[in-house]
Amino acid sequence: MRKTAVFILIGILVFVGIAFGQQKFYGVVQTMPQQGYVGQWNIDGKTVNVTKDTKIEEKHGKLAVGAYVEVEGVTFEGKFIASELETEKKK
């Protein structure tokens, strides 16, 4: 029951973003989960937590190690939770 409440709260915070200040950065995917997208990623040395609620967009290529991405999200209890992860063309 408590876990469900925590996931609901995280979902609300991720998509509202205002409560903790939405953050955005660009970087190269260094590591990602072996199966699917949900889990911990390392993007330019930063730990990024991707959830089932994270919006994934692959307009500029497949998400993979080495891909250049835009990451949006919030920091909650010391963890960066991604609300959106999108491939981009390298600048």
Image (cartoon, helix red, strand yellow):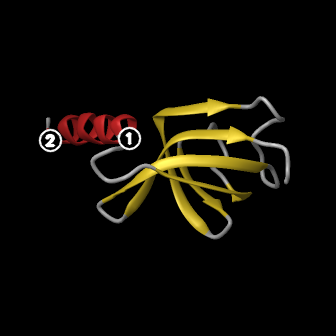
Q: Label 2 vs label 1: CA separation? A: 18 Å
Q: Are marks 2 and 1 in contact (CB under 8 Å)?
A: no
- Which residue is found at the position 85% from the left and 54% from the top? 91
Kindly identify the amino acid type of the residue bearing the numbered disc 1: Val
Marking on residue 14 = 1
In the image as oriented, which residue stretches furthest toward the bottom? 45
Task: Indicate left or right for 83 with 62 as reference.
Answer: left
Residue found at x 43% / y 49%: 22
Residue at point 22%, 41% (across, down): 3
Circle 2 residue: 2
Q: Earlier in the sequence, mark 2 or mark 1?
A: 2
From the viewer's perspective, tell me whether residue 5 is left or right of residue 23. Answer: left
**Residue shown at the point (22%, 42%) measured from the top left:** 6
Q: Pinpoint residue 32: horizontal percent, then vertical percent.
A: 66, 52
Judge from the rendering whether residue 15 lies leftward or rightward of residue 1; answer left or right.
right
Type of the residue with mark 2: Arg
SS assignment at label 1: helix
Vertical comparison of 76 with 46: above or below: above
Q: Seen from this angle, which residue lies furthest left?
A: 1
Q: Residues within 10 Å of mark 1 (few under 14, many from 20)?
A: many
Q: Position of residue 64 (x, y in %)?
A: 77, 46
